[in-house]
Protein backbone atom coordinates (compact mmCIF):
# COMPACT_ATOMS: atom_id res chain seq x y z
CA UNK A 1 0.00 0.00 0.00
CA UNK A 2 1.31 3.43 -0.91
CA UNK A 3 0.53 4.84 2.51
CA UNK A 4 2.63 2.29 4.39
CA UNK A 5 5.38 2.53 1.78
CA UNK A 6 5.57 6.25 2.42
CA UNK A 7 5.74 5.65 6.16
CA UNK A 8 8.52 3.11 5.63
CA UNK A 9 10.46 5.54 3.45
CA UNK A 10 10.07 8.26 6.10
CA UNK A 11 11.18 5.88 8.82
CA UNK A 12 14.25 4.84 6.85
CA UNK A 13 15.19 8.44 6.13
CA UNK A 14 14.77 9.48 9.78
CA UNK A 15 16.89 6.53 10.90
CA UNK A 16 19.62 7.48 8.46
CA UNK A 17 19.53 11.08 9.67
CA UNK A 18 19.73 9.94 13.27
CA UNK A 19 22.63 7.68 12.35
CA UNK A 20 24.47 10.54 10.68
CA UNK A 21 23.87 12.75 13.69
CA UNK A 22 25.15 10.08 16.04
CA UNK A 23 28.28 9.69 13.90
CA UNK A 24 28.87 13.44 14.13
CA UNK A 25 28.44 13.43 17.91
CA UNK A 26 30.85 10.50 18.28
CA UNK A 27 33.42 12.20 16.03
CA UNK A 28 33.22 15.45 18.03
CA UNK A 29 33.55 13.48 21.24
CA UNK A 30 36.56 11.56 19.90
CA UNK A 31 38.27 14.82 18.92
CA UNK A 32 37.49 16.33 22.32
CA UNK A 33 38.95 13.34 24.18
CA UNK A 34 42.07 13.32 22.02
CA UNK A 35 42.67 17.03 22.55
CA UNK A 36 42.18 16.80 26.30
CA UNK A 37 44.63 13.94 26.49
CA UNK A 38 47.13 15.84 24.38
CA UNK A 39 47.03 18.94 26.61
CA UNK A 40 47.13 16.88 29.78
CA UNK A 41 50.03 14.72 28.62
CA UNK A 42 51.95 17.80 27.49
CA UNK A 43 51.57 19.37 30.93
CA UNK A 44 52.60 16.10 32.60
CA UNK A 45 55.62 15.95 30.30
CA UNK A 46 56.68 19.48 31.29
CA UNK A 47 56.24 18.74 34.98
CA UNK A 48 58.47 15.69 34.69
CA UNK A 49 61.22 17.51 32.76
CA UNK A 50 64.63 17.04 34.28
CA UNK A 51 66.76 20.04 33.60
CA UNK A 52 70.53 19.84 33.47
CA UNK A 53 70.54 23.63 33.91
CA UNK A 54 69.42 25.75 36.77
CA UNK A 55 65.83 26.90 36.33
CA UNK A 56 64.13 29.93 37.88
CA UNK A 57 62.91 29.02 41.31
CA UNK A 58 59.46 30.54 40.93
CA UNK A 59 57.28 31.08 43.99
CA UNK A 60 58.21 34.74 44.42
CA UNK A 61 57.23 37.02 41.58
CA UNK A 62 60.09 39.35 42.46
CA UNK A 63 62.63 36.58 41.76
CA UNK A 64 61.36 36.41 38.18
CA UNK A 65 62.16 40.01 37.31
CA UNK A 66 65.24 41.19 35.50
CA UNK A 67 67.85 39.40 33.46
CA UNK A 68 70.71 37.22 34.54
CA UNK A 69 74.17 36.43 33.24
CA UNK A 70 76.02 33.14 33.35
CA UNK A 71 73.09 30.86 32.57
CA UNK A 72 72.42 28.86 29.44
CA UNK A 73 69.45 29.53 27.16
CA UNK A 74 67.07 26.55 27.26
CA UNK A 75 66.52 26.72 23.48
CA UNK A 76 69.91 27.58 21.97
CA UNK A 77 72.29 26.68 24.80
CA UNK A 78 74.16 30.01 24.52
CA UNK A 79 75.60 31.37 27.72
CA UNK A 80 74.37 34.92 27.55
CA UNK A 81 72.00 37.35 29.15
CA UNK A 82 68.83 35.40 29.87
CA UNK A 83 65.38 36.17 31.18
CA UNK A 84 62.54 34.01 32.45
CA UNK A 85 60.85 31.93 29.78
CA UNK A 86 57.36 30.55 30.27
CA UNK A 87 57.37 27.19 28.54
CA UNK A 88 53.60 27.34 28.13
CA UNK A 89 53.23 31.08 27.43
CA UNK A 90 51.00 32.98 29.83
CA UNK A 91 48.78 33.90 26.88
CA UNK A 92 48.06 30.19 26.42
CA UNK A 93 47.08 29.74 30.06
CA UNK A 94 50.53 28.75 31.31
CA UNK A 95 51.12 29.31 35.04
CA UNK A 96 53.22 32.39 35.86
CA UNK A 97 55.23 31.29 38.88
CA UNK A 98 55.02 27.50 38.95
CA UNK A 99 58.54 26.17 38.59
CA UNK A 100 57.73 23.43 36.07
CA UNK A 101 56.67 26.10 33.57
CA UNK A 102 59.84 28.19 33.92
CA UNK A 103 63.16 28.16 32.12
CA UNK A 104 65.90 30.63 31.15
CA UNK A 105 65.97 31.93 27.58
CA UNK A 106 68.03 34.48 25.72
CA UNK A 107 66.35 37.47 24.14
CA UNK A 108 66.51 36.27 20.48
CA UNK A 109 64.89 32.94 21.40
CA UNK A 110 62.31 34.42 23.76
CA UNK A 111 61.43 37.25 21.38
CA UNK A 112 61.21 35.17 18.20
CA UNK A 113 59.04 32.59 19.93
CA UNK A 114 56.52 35.18 21.08
CA UNK A 115 53.37 33.50 22.33
CA UNK A 116 53.86 30.28 20.37
CA UNK A 117 54.22 26.97 22.19
CA UNK A 118 56.66 25.64 19.60
CA UNK A 119 60.45 25.73 19.49
CA UNK A 120 61.57 29.29 18.51
CA UNK A 121 61.73 29.84 14.72
CA UNK A 122 65.51 30.21 14.62
CA UNK A 123 68.10 28.40 12.46
CA UNK A 124 68.07 24.72 13.50
CA UNK A 125 71.88 24.71 13.92
CA UNK A 126 71.71 27.18 16.82
CA UNK A 127 68.91 25.29 18.59
CA UNK A 128 70.69 22.78 20.79
CA UNK A 129 69.32 23.63 24.21
CA UNK A 130 67.88 21.11 26.64
CA UNK A 131 64.30 22.31 26.15
CA UNK A 132 64.61 22.17 22.35
CA UNK A 133 65.73 18.54 22.64
CA UNK A 134 62.86 17.77 25.01
CA UNK A 135 60.31 19.34 22.66
CA UNK A 136 61.67 17.37 19.71
CA UNK A 137 61.26 14.18 21.71
CA UNK A 138 57.71 15.02 22.71
CA UNK A 139 56.53 15.58 19.14
CA UNK A 140 53.19 17.27 18.66
CA UNK A 141 52.38 20.04 21.12
CA UNK A 142 48.84 21.21 21.91
CA UNK A 143 47.48 24.46 20.50
CA UNK A 144 47.06 27.52 22.78
CA UNK A 145 43.30 26.96 22.58
CA UNK A 146 43.59 23.36 23.78
CA UNK A 147 45.82 24.41 26.65
CA UNK A 148 43.53 27.25 27.67
CA UNK A 149 40.61 24.81 27.69
CA UNK A 150 42.70 22.42 29.75
CA UNK A 151 43.56 25.04 32.36
CA UNK A 152 40.04 26.49 32.46
CA UNK A 153 38.66 23.01 33.10
CA UNK A 154 41.31 22.35 35.77
CA UNK A 155 40.44 25.53 37.61
CA UNK A 156 36.72 24.89 37.36
CA UNK A 157 37.13 21.39 38.78
CA UNK A 158 39.14 22.55 41.78
ZN1 LIG B 1 68.51 31.27 23.02
Image (tube, grey):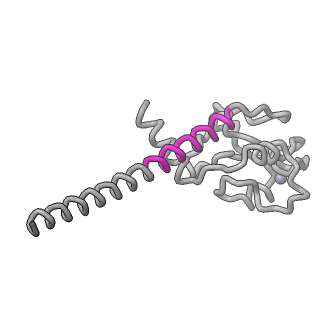
Could you say which quadrant of the image residue 9 lies in?
bottom left
What stretch of residues is rendered in magenta?
Answer: 29-47
* Residue 103 image offset from top left, x and y in percent: 75, 41
* Residue 73 image offset from top left, x and y in percent: 84, 47
Residue positioned 69% across, 45% down in the render: 87
Q: Is residue 111 left or right of residue 35?
A: right
Residue positioned 81% across, 52% down in the render: 106
Most distant residue in the front direction: 1
Q: Is residue 15 left or right of residue 112?
A: left
Residue positioned 64% across, 46% down in the render: 88
Q: Is residue 45 left or right of residue 69?
A: left
* Residue 93 image offset from top left, x and y in percent: 55, 47
Q: Nearer the viewer, residue 104 or 143?
A: 143
* Quadrant (top left, top right, bottom left, bottom right) of the N terminus: bottom left
* Quadrant (top left, top right, bottom left, bottom right) of the C terminus: top left
Is residue 46 part of the magenta span, yes or no? yes
Q: Please state the total of marks drawn on the protein image.
A: 0
Residue positioned 45% across, 40% down in the render: 153
* Residue 53 image offset from top left, x and y in percent: 84, 35
Q: Is residue 65 above or below residue 124?
A: above
Is residue 41 part of the magenta span, yes or no? yes
Q: Nearer the viewer, residue 126 or 33?
A: 33
Q: Is residue 96 above or below residue 28?
A: above
Q: Nearer the viewer, residue 97 or 127?
A: 127
Magenta stretch, main secondary structure, is helix
Q: Is residue 38 left or right of residue 46?
A: left
Q: Nearer the viewer, residue 71 or 139?
A: 139
Amino acid sequence: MPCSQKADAEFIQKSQEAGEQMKLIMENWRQYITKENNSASFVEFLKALESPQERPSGFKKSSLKGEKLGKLCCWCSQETLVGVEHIIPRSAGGPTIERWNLAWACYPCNHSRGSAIEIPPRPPEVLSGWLTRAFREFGEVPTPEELRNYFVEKLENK
